[in-house]
């Protein structure tokens, strides 16, 4: 057991990943967040014919988090495609920083299961966040 919430986060990310709109990269990503009240909020990547307008799964999940009235991310699962690690991109690390403490666990997975766990602090050292303003 990676953490007590891993399984339900994994299932949420795996299900939403299948809904990804990825006609260009064909690379489906699902993200699931644990919230303050132990709910699960999910999001998938949504690509666009104007490529830079595409949105990562983590950004979709953040939109959902805030839309549902939550303020904090407690734990994260990201599921990419294929066998290699799908770690959050640089932009998404910063997006996550807005709503996550540095010790928040980020479990990077593929559809078959867990590949690696890190923390936001490890993925984004010396970061700039709300308290730096
Ligand atoms: N992608 C994500 O959704 N999250 C990440 O952290 C890495 C990349 C998406 C963006 C694009 O739709 C596809 O994966 C290929 O880069």
Image (cartoon, helix red, strand yellow):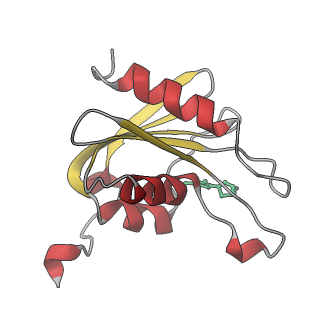
Say which quadrant the C terminus sits in.
bottom left
Report whether 36 appears left or right of 77: left
Locate residue 9, reporting x and y percent.
Answer: 42, 30
Looking at this view, is 120 or 84 the one in front?
Answer: 120
Report whether 128 appears left or right of 56: left
Q: Residue furthest front?
A: 68
Examine the image and state in which quarter residue 117 appears.
Answer: top left
Examine the image and state in which quarter residue 112 appears.
Answer: top right
Say which quadrant the N terminus sits in.
top left
Measuring 63% from the left and 44% from the top, which residue is drawn there?
A: 29
Report whether 115 appears left or right of 130: right
Measuring 66% from the left and 32% from the top, which residue is drawn there?
A: 83
Vertical side of 126 occupied by 20: above or below: above
Q: Residue furthest top?
A: 1
Vertical side of 69 occupied by 113: above or below: above
> Within the displayed image, which quadrant is ligand 1 positioned in?
bottom right
């Amino acid at each position: 057991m990676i953490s007590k919430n891993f399984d339900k986060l994994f299932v949420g990310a795996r299900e939403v990943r299948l809904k990804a709109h990825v006609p260009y990269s064909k690379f489906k990503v699902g993200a699931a967040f644990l919230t303050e009240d132990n709910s699960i909020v999910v999001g998938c990547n949504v690509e666009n014919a104007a490529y830079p307008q595409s949105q990562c799964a983590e950004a979709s999940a953040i939109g959902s988090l805030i839309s549902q009235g939550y303020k904090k991310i407690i734990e994260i699962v990201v599921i990419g495609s294929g066998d290699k690690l799908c770690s959050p991109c640089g932009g998404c690390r910063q997006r996550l920083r807005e709503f996550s403490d540095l010790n928040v666990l980020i479990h990077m997975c593929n559809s078959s299961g867990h590949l690696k766990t890190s923390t936001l602090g490890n993925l984004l050292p010396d970061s700039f966040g709300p308290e730096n303003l």
